[in-house]
Image (tube, rainbow, N blue to C red):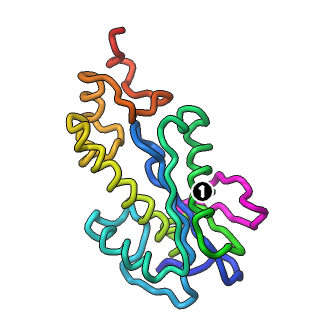
């Protein structure tokens, strides 16, 4: 069972991101404040859930949460400030979207920067331990997946509808064949050394 809260504060926000390891598209973060009596048997880390279950949970989280925010940081900015800074920026921007100011923030992972002098705690594998981080992970993942599926219609050869921009064999061979798009993160190693472009 996932715990509802880490701190004794009433308004605790959980935040998480999706898409950090992708070769293309944005990194997306969400922040969620759940009510003190929130319960849902299916809610856990988004990586442990099927796409169907994530899509089922999203409207429940959005309806039940006291407040939630979702934010995108796109590939151009990822290339400029690096993926770690972009992930933290996306989490800060998702916290900006909350209608309620949290009194405490719990963050998935081990890196974060102070946000508005609100106390925070980083938690490794927090999305498998705390409901608000799990809820944030589901929102971040489903919003990002929807976005990549729309991009797929524009660039079908990369099959982003299936791989969502992650470095699959199929995605890498499409990059080798057609080159990178405006949606690729050029600061990332798009191809392994043996598949470098012949420039």
Seen from this angle, which residue lies furthest bottom? 37
In the figure, residue 103 lies in which quadrant?
A: bottom right
Q: Is residue 150 left or right of residue 25?
A: left
Residue at which label 1 appears: 93
> Is 182 above or below relative to 45?
above
Farthest top residue in view: 199
Q: Quadrant of residue 191?
A: top left
Label 1: how many residues lie within 10 Å, few (<14), some (14-19) or many (20+)? many
Local secondary structure at mark 1: helix
Q: Which one is nearer the viewer's eye here, 139 or 132?
A: 139
Q: In the rendered structure, which segment of residues is drawn in magenta?
A: 109-125
The residue drawn where x is 55% and y is 38% is: 77
Q: Position of residue 111 (x, y in %)?
A: 65, 51
- Residue at coordinates 60% horizontally, 73% vertically from top-left? 99
- The outermost residue toward the right is 117
Residue 143 placed where, x, y %?
39, 59
Q: Nearer the viewer, residue 78 or 51?
A: 78
Residue 33 rendering spot, x and y as whole percentages: 57, 76
Residue 170 or residue 148, whichever sits in front: 148
- Measured along the vertical axis of the image, is residue 122 above or below residue 150? below
Q: Is residue 118 magenta?
A: yes
Chief SS of the magenta region = loop
> In the image, is 28 to the left or to the right of 95?
left
Residue 163 included in the magenta stretch of the image = no
Could you tell me residue 49's position as x and y percent? 33, 66
């Amino acid at each position: 069972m996932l715990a509802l809260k880490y701190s004794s504060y009433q308004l605790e926000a959980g935040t998480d991101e999706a898409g950090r390891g992708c070769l293309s598209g944005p990194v997306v973060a969400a922040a969620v404040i759940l009510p003190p009596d929130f319960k849902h048997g299916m809610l856990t880390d988004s990586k442990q859930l099927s796409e169907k279950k994530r899509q089922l949970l999203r409207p429940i989280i959005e309806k039940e949460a006291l407040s939630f925010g979702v934010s995108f940081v796109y590939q151009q900015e990822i290339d400029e400030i690096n993926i770690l800074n972009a992930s933290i920026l996306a989490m800060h921007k998702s916290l900006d979207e909350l209608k309620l100011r949290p009194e405490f923030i719990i963050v998935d992972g081990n890196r974060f920067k102070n946000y508005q002098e609100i106390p925070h705690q980083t938690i490794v594998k927090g999305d498998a331990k705390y409901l608000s981080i799990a809820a944030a992970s589901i929102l971040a993942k489903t919003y990002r997946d929807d976005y990549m599926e729309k991009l797929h219609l524009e660039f079908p050869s990369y099959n982003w509808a299936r791989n969502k921009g992650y470095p699959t064999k199929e995605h890498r061979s499409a990059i080798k064949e057609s080159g990178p798009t405006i949606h690729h993160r050029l600061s990332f190693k798009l191809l392994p050394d043996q598949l470098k472009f012949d420039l």
